Amino acid sequence: MAFDFQVAVDCAGPHELADWWAETLGWIVEMPDPDFIRRMIDEGYATAEETTTSNGQLAWKTGAAIRHPDGPASGERRRIIFQQVPEPKTGKNRWHLDVFVGADNIREQADRLIARGASFVHEGQQGPHRWITLADPEGNEFCVS
């Protein structure tokens, strides 16, 4: 039996990082239903302090998600969720995303991402395969290949 999953990323600024990654991957920032959030507050399941405004809409303060543009808006879907945690990142990721841009586009795309706030970490090659390791604005490593 195969399982679906989502990738969860611990971070300090979930909405900012979701926006950055959505633009990076060409994905869509998921916006929660503001009526649902208001209902959760009205029914005592949440407080107004647990909300924020993101991209002009009411949202949960401690989390944001992005999804593939071809996937469904709800239910089983390819998605990355960014969740706020109190502690800062302290070491190298134990695993990371590889963003495939095509062998002829690696340098151009890496430079574009650096201009948008990524930082250069490493350039590597194994046989004919080349990649550039970058870190997103919060220091999470990923490869452009």
Image: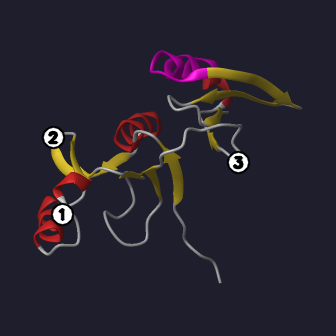
**In the depicted structure, whether residue 83 falls above or below residue 112:** below
Q: Which mark is residue 37?
A: 1
**In the depicted structure, whether residue 54 falls above or below residue 144:** below
Mark with earlier residue (1, 2): 1
- Residue flagged by tag 3: what amino acid is it? Trp
Residue 30 picture location, percent across and down: 31, 53
Q: Which residue is mark 2?
A: 56
Q: Locate the C terminus by quadrant.
A: top right
Of labels 1 and 2, the one closer to you? 1
Magenta-highlighted stretch: main secondary structure?
helix
**In the depicted structure, whether residue 97 falls above or below residue 105:** below
Residue stretch rendered in magenta on the structure? 107-119
Mark with earlier residue (1, 3): 1
Q: Within 10 angstroms of label 1, few (less than 14), some, or many (20 or more) residues?
A: many
- Residue flagged by tag 1: what amino acid is it? Ile
Farthest residue to the bottom: give it. Answer: 1
Label 1 and label 2: CA atoms lie apart by: 15 Å
SS category of the residue bearing label 1: helix
SS category of the residue bearing label 2: loop
Mark with earlier residue (2, 3): 2
Q: Is residue 2 left or right of residue 55?
A: right
Q: Locate the N terminus by quadrant.
A: bottom right
Q: Quadrant of residue 15?
A: top left
Label 2 and label 3: CA atoms lie apart by: 33 Å
SS category of the residue bearing label 3: loop
Label 1 and label 3: CA atoms lie apart by: 33 Å
Q: Which residue is mark 3?
A: 95
